[in-house]
Every structure is written in C-alpha cells, then in structure tokens.
Amino acid sequence: MKKFKSLLMGLVLAVLLAACTSAETEELIEYHNGFVDLWEEKGEEMDVLAQEAMNLTSIEEVYELERDEFLPIVDEIVEFVTSQSPDSDVALEYHGMRDEQVQVWSEAVYADFELLEQLANGEITEEESFELYEDVEVLYIEAEQLMMEADDKIEELSEEHDFTLEEIEE
C-alpha cells in the first residue's frame, strides 16, 4: 500500500508539473504571438506612412505627417508592450527584453522626430541634422541589437518548451 501511495503521489506530482509547464508555455506563446502580430501590423502602417512622406515636398509636411500619424502608432506599440503583465517567470523575462527593445526604439524615433522638428522650425540646418543624427542612429542600432537578443531568446525558449514560433517578418 505504501508503494502504491508513493507511486500515486509521484504521478500526481508529475501531472501537476506538466500542467504548470504547459500554462507557462501557453502564456509565453500568447505573449510572443501578440507582440509579433502587433509589430507586423503597425510596421506595415508605418511603412505606408514612410512611403507617403517620401512623396511630400516640404520638411513641414513630413513633420506634420510624423507628428499626426506616425508617432501615435509608436505610442500605441509602446502602450501595448508596457501594458502587458505576464505571470510566469519565463514570459516575464521575455517581456522585459521586448519592453527594453521597444523603449529604446521609441526613444530613437522620438529623437529622430525632434531633429525633424528643429529642421522644420529652422533651428538647425540640414547639415547639422545629419551630424546630430549620428546619436539617433546609435539608438536605432541599440534597439536592433536588443531585438536580435529577444529573437534569440524566444528561439531558445521555443526549443526548451517545445513550440513553434510565429516569425517576425522584417
């Protein structure tokens, strides 16, 4: 009887551990897929706006387009990511990586916009904006590195937790 109780306890414990892992994996998958879906959808919207901006004839028009349409999309992405609050440690760690990536990217976009604003207002010359853009470029590069680290992490986690990734199209 003692062996049966031990065996039964072992089976119950194994089932409980599997259920916990499964819930943790499900949360991670849902988080990742939600992020990917938003990133792709908003990325497509930003690509359309970038094309529109290329067809505009003045810096002022580009400034207005970015202020009125582009930055709200950036804010929406930041809001989505910062509003997420995963429960499991693994999803929380991954969320932290994506949050950092999006924060640095947003900082780069806003720094880029500030240069455009200064240029549109005549506060700096085009040559000065190119020089100042080097600092902005550093932020974009950092955001890209953070994105690659998060991509590597989710790949590692997908292997560890045995699930297939929904790829981010770049």
Image (tube, rainbow, N blue to C red):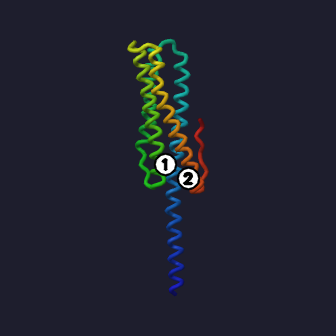
Between 84 and 124, the one nearer to me in the picture: 124
Residue type at mark 1?
Answer: Tyr
User: Closer to the camera, 129 or 40?
Assistant: 129
Q: Residues within 10 Å of mark 2 (few under 14, many from 20)?
A: many
Mark before the other along the chain sequence, 2 or 1: 1
> Is 139 located above or below residue 122 in the figure?
below
Q: Looking at the image, which residue is at 55% across and 52% down?
A: 157
User: Are circles 2 and 1 on residues that touch, CB within 8 Å?
Assistant: yes
| Amino acid, disc 2 | Leu
Instruction: Give coordinates of residue 80: x percent, y percent.
Output: 44, 40
Q: Give the residue at x 51% y 52%.
A: 28
On screen, 55 above or below 98?
above
Residue at label 2? Answer: 157
**Viewer-nearest residue: 34 or 140:** 140
Quarter that holds the C terminus = top right
> Considering depth in this image, is 134 or 47 the residue closer to the camera?
134
The residue shown at (52%, 46%) is 32
Residue at far bottom of view: 1
Report the residue marked by disc 1.
Answer: 94
Helix, strand or loop for disc 2: helix
Query: Element at badge 1?
Result: helix
**Horizontal and vertical percent position of residue 83:** 40, 43
- The crowding category of the residue bearing disc 1, from other C-alpha atoms within 10 Å (few below 14, some 14 to 19, many at least 20), is many
